[in-house]
Amino acid sequence: MAFAFLIVDDDADVLKAAALALGGPQTQVEVAPSPLGIEERAAGCDAVLLDMNFALGDRSGGEGLSVLARLKAAEPERSVVLMTTFGGVSLAVDALKAGADDFILKPWRNQALEAAMTKAAHATRSRRAEAGLTLDEIERRAIVRALSANDGNVSRAAKSLGLTRPALYRRIERHGL
């Protein structure tokens, strides 16, 4: 079964390693070095693998929890797996209480990472089916959010979605926006 994953981490080596671990012949893996515009970039993804700390020297996990809240507000059905090097039981509990589907410590075992993300992707698809959401509806919502967040500027909305302007125009026409 093919899945779409988004990996968000400020460490290029972690992005590469996670993409290699999760990438397969039928799996689409996108990477992002920061959480900027993550709500739009995550549209259509089955699961997000999210680092908890992006500021140099920060070990609190606060930024990851904040980004998790934004992702869950954008699409409550989407699964998020949090990861960090500096984690303890209390941080994992806080993450799970905040809506994370799983919590992984770096460095990880590839099999454990793959299992966590596959389980998260299945959970996303199950929740979407229960909510009656299709990928087209999720994409439509992401486009509407991106256009709204960028005051209707198609160029900026396309950039935040990781699309070209012509690709966004085609999707706008397809969705009747």
Image: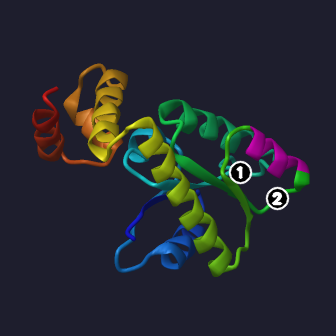
Q: Residue at x 63, y 79 (%)?
A: 110
Q: Earlier in the sequence, mark 2 or mark 1?
A: 1
**What amino acid is found at the position of numbered circle 2 in the picture?**
Phe
Q: Amino acid at mark 1?
A: Leu
Is 102 situated above or below 62?
below
Can you identify the residue that label 1 sits on?
56
Farthest residue toward the front? 130
Q: What is the spatial separation of the Cα atoms under label 2 and label 1, in whole angstroms?
A: 13 Å
Left or right position of 29 against 12: left
Asked if the stretch drawn in magenta spans residue 91, the answer is yes
| Secondary structure that dominates the magenta span | helix
Residue range of the region highlighted in magenta in the rendering? 90-97
- Residue 86's disc is 2
> What percent of the width, then of the height, locates residue 137?
30, 37
Of 70 and 17, nearer the camera is 70
Label 2 packing within 10 angstroms: few (<14), some (14-19), many (20+): some
Number of numbered discs overlaid on the protein picture: 2
Q: Taking 60 as reference, is 125 left or right?
A: left
Residue situated in front as seen by the camera: 58 or 106: 106
Tell me if residue 21 is in the magenta stretch: no
* Quarter that holds the C terminus: top left
Callout 1: SS? loop
